[in-house]
Amino acid sequence: MSDKIYKFSLGIRKEEDFYIAKCFEIDVVSQGKSVEEALANIKEALILYIESFGDEDIPSARDETFFTPIEVHT
């Protein structure tokens, strides 16, 4: 595999004793006992995903995704 650089947007949240990391561009999720471990684990999971499935379905870096918080009151 060539040395390509991919940029992904991640969300990390704490659930009980673990930090859950989710990639928004492709459906990859991982976890760790710390933020650093969750980041290392999702990085490894993303590499395995690309090696297994290729990168044809990964959005281009040109296709920027913007995230912003929003409040919803019911």
Image (spheres, rainbow, N blue to C red):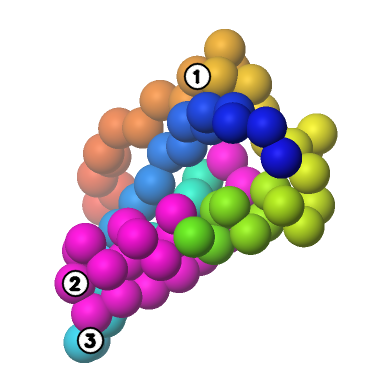
| Marks 1 and 3, how far apart at CA | 32 Å
Dot 1 surroundings within 10 Å: few (below 14), some, or many (20 or more)? few
Q: Is residue 49 left or right of residue 37?
A: right
First in residue order: circle 1 vs circle 2: 2
Identify the residue under disc 3: 16
- Tell me the quadrant of the picture where the N terminus can be found: top right
Task: Name the residue carrying label 2.
Answer: 34
Can the viewer see residue 16?
A: yes
Tell me the residue that label 1 is attached to.
64
Amino acid found under the numbered disc labelled 2: Ser
**Helix, strand or loop at disc 2?**
loop
- Which circle's residue, 1 or 3, is located before the other in the chain? 3
Whole-percent x and y of residue 50? 69, 48
Asked whether residue 20 appears in the rendered view, the answer is no
Disc 3 secondary structure class:
loop
Q: Determine which of the numbered discs, if any, sits on residue 41 in the image.
A: none
Labelled pair 1, 3 in contact (Cβ < 8 Å):
no
Q: Quadrant of the C terminus?
A: bottom left
Distance from the alpha carbon under mark 3 to that under mark 2:
12 Å
Measure the alpha-carbon separation of dots 1 and 2.
28 Å
Magenta segment: 25-43
